[in-house]
Amino acid sequence: MDAMAMTNPFTFLQQVRSETAKVTWPSRRETMISTIMVLSMVVLASIFFFAVDQLYGWGFDLVFGLGR
């Protein structure tokens, strides 16, 4: 059998705790800056896609004269 399959739950949890201790967690400031950056990019992308959608709608209306 595989050695990994033979690990008991207690040993597994010790290994998980050991690996988690090695992680470099972001500070509160880094988390806030990243969150603000993501939200601002979401807003900018939303505005961009809304504008493109409106432009395409206007263009199709102009070319095909639909909805009149």
Image (spheres, helix red, strand yellow):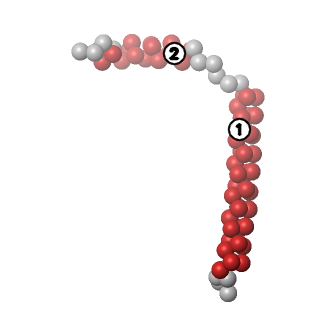
Number of dots carrying numbers: 2
Callout 1 secondary element: helix
Point out the residue furthest to the left here.
Answer: 1
9 with respect to 36 (left or right): left
Q: Are marks 2 and 1 in contact (CB under 8 Å)?
A: no
Callout 2 secondary element: helix
In the rendered image, residue 11, in percent from the top left (x then y), is placed at: 39, 12
> Residue 26's mark?
none
Instruction: Kindly identify the residue that appears in the image at 30 percent across and 18 percent down.
Output: 5
| Res. 8 visible in picture | no
Q: Residues within 10 Å of mark 2 (few under 14, many from 20)?
A: few
Position above or below: 12 against 29: above
> Residue 19's mark?
2
Of the image marks 2 and 1, the number of the one nearer the N terminus: 2
Q: Amino acid at mark 1?
A: Thr
Q: Amino acid at mark 2?
A: Glu
Position above or below: 56 against 26: below
63 with respect to 14 (left or right): right
Where residue 41 sits, quadrant-wise, is top right
| Res. 32 visible in picture | yes
Which of 48 and 59 lies nearest the eye of the viewer? 59
Instruction: Kindly identify the residue that appears in the image at 59 percent across and 18 percent down.
Output: 23
In the rendered image, residue 54, in percent from the top left (x then y), is placed at: 71, 67
Residue that label 1 marks = 35
Disc 2 to disc 1, C-alpha distance: 26 Å
Which of 61 and 63 lies nearest the eye of the viewer? 63
Point out the residue furthest to the front here.
Answer: 63
